[in-house]
Structures are given as structure tokens and as C-alpha cells.
């Protein structure tokens, strides 16, 4: 395949292999999809899932219920939650896609085999949290999420995910994919295999404390699951000189974006 693409003038082929040994000559690049994720087995009973949670996660779900947090699993008004996404981006210091990107995703995948939908948690009409979810095959995936800067002690995100898990079970889905967690400090290179299930104590950790996903990983690992690690994204370089120019250009764009 590489020779065929090279003959057609292609610069590189970007791949996400199951095993890094399959691409020994490829170059590691920034991951397009998370290289490490947490997957919850929905065949377990609700009581079993609750028992396997970190105690603080169970407590926060009860806190949200006590405060009367309401969850809607089929919200269609993305305009109303865009403020939450901007707040979360500012708080976490990461860049968002354009608003139209998220809106078109929800609209174009509203029906069909692969379904995207917006789920929200609120208290007295005040939005607390919002998630963009994907249902495909036997899996529900947590793709994007946001939470408000206000009423954070109401623990809306915890109840929102618990109700999404309960709903996924009711629909007959088998897995809940948390779509990305930070690696633990000292983790060996990913080789495309499932790790053992996390203990409650491990479930409270966010991975490396300096990792940009440390906070959200700590939240996700409060729920039970098995972690899956893959090698990540690689570039099979077909034209080295053009590829180097491409890399320089991408680096310049990232620098400019920091100040725009």
C-alpha cells in the first residue's frame, strides 16, 4: 500500500494500529483518537456498578439526587449549552472546535445506525452539565462534555453520567466508553491490550499529575471499568522532505493559535 500511495504523490499515511510493532518504521505523531480509554461493562447490575465505584463518586451521585438535579437525555438545544462549553474550555485551558462543528455533528447524526445526541443536567432550569454522546453498535461513547462554573457543589456531571449509564443498559447496549484517560505515571508503552480492572484506590487517580487530562481522568476513573491502551496515531512517511515542511507548518500554526 505504501508503494502505491507513494506512486500517487501522497506525502504520508496516518494510521492508528493495534500493535506498535506493525509500524516500526512509522513516526509517532499527535494522537487523533485517545490512545488510552476506560470502558465500563454494562452487563453488570446497577447494584454491582454502584458498589464498584469510588465511594466519593457514589456519594456525589446521591448529592445530586438530594439537590433535585434533573437529567434530560434527548436535549436538542445546543445553543443553550454553548456557554458551558466555553466556560469549560476557559477553565481547562484547551481550545474548542467551532460551535458549528458540534451542532452539525448532533444534527447530521440525529438518526441512523450511528446516533449522536445531547444530554444535560440542570437544577431549576439552570444548566449544570452537558454531554455529547454517540451510540454505535453495542457501545455508548462519551465524546464531549462541559460543566458550569456555578453550582458545582450540586455534582451535576456525576448524576448525568449515571443516568446515561442506566439508560444505555435499558437500551441493551453492552459498553460505556469514556473516550480517553491519562496514562498512569510510569505506565509501559501501549501495546493494544486490556489492562486489569482498576481498584477503588486506583480509580481515584488522574494519572500523571501534570498531564492535561489529569482532572477529567480522576473523574472518569471514579466509575468502574477496564482500561484499554493502544499505540496511538502514527504517520507512515512517504515523502520525507515534504513531510518535514508539513511538520514545520503545523508547528507554526499551533504557535499562532496560542495567541489568537
Image (cartoon, rainbow, N blue to C red):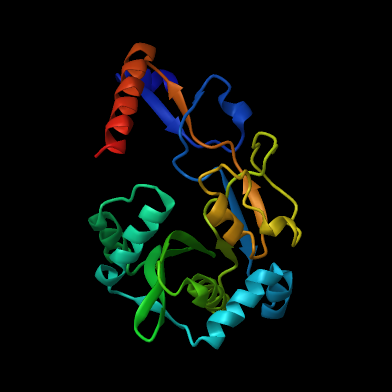
Question: Which quarter of the image is occupied by the N terminus?
Answer: top left
**Residue 19 sits in which quadrant?**
top right
Q: Is residue 202 left or right of residue 248?
A: right
Picture coordinates of residue 93, whole percent (x, y)? 40, 48
Q: Quadrant of residue 241?
A: top left
Left or right relative to 130: residue 59: right
Residue at point 43%, 62% (across, down): 145
Q: Nearer the viewer, residue 241 or 152?
A: 152
x and y percent of residue 214 in the render? 57, 50
Q: How many marks?
A: 0
In this view, 34 is above or below 254: below
User: Quadrant of the rendered structure where residue 131 is?
Assistant: bottom left
Q: Please determine whether, in this image, residue 58 is positioned above or below residue 37.
A: below
- 260, above or below 152, in the image: above
Is residue 83 visible in this depiction of the protein?
yes
Which quadrant would the C terminus be assigned to in this image?
top left
Amino acid at each position: 500500500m505504501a508503494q502505491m500511495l507513494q506512486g500517487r504523490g501522497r506525502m504520508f499515511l496516518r494510521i492508528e494500529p493495534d500493535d506498535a510493532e506493525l509500524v516500526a518504521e512509522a513516526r509517532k505523531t499527535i494522537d487523533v483518537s485517545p490512545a488510552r480509554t476506560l470502558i465500563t461493562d454494562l452487563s453488570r447490575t446497577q447494584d454491582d456498578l454502584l458498589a464498584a465505584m469510588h465511594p466519593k463518586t457514589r456519594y456525589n451521585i446521591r448529592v445530586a439526587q438530594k439537590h433535585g438535579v434533573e437529567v434530560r437525555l434527548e436535549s436538542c438545544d445546543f445553543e443553550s449549552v454553548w456557554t458551558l462549553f466555553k466556560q469549560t474550555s476557559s477553565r481547562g485551558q484547551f481550545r474548542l472546535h467551532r460551535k458549528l462543528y458540534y451542532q452539525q455533528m448532533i444534527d447530521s447524526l440525529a438518526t441512523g445506525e450511528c446516533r449522536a445526541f445531547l444530554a444535560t443536567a440542570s437544577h431549576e432550569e439552570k444548566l449544570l452539565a452537558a454531554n455529547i454522546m454517540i451510540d454505535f453498535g453495542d457501545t455508548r461513547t462519551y465524546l464531549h462534555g462541559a460543566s458550569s462554573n456555578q453550582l458545582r457543589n450540586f455534582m451535576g456531571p456525576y448524576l448525568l453520567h449515571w443516568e446515561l449509564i442506566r439508560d444505555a443498559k435499558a437500551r441493551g447496549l453492552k459498553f460505556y466508553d469514556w473516550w480517553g484517560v491519562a496514562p498512569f505515571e510510569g505506565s509501559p508503552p501501549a501495546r493494544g491490550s486490556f489492562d486489569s480492572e482498576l481498584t477503588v484506590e486506583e480509580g481515584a487517580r488522574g494519572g500523571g499529575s501534570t498531564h492535561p487530562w489529569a482532572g477529567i481522568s480522576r473523574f472518569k476513573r471514579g466509575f468502574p471499568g477496564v482500561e484499554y491502551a493502544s499505540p496511538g496515531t502514527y504517520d507512515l512517511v512517504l515523502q520525507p522532505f515534504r513531510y518535514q515542511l508539513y511538520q514545520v507548518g503545523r508547528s507554526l500554526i499551533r504557535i499562532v493559535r496560542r495567541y489568537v
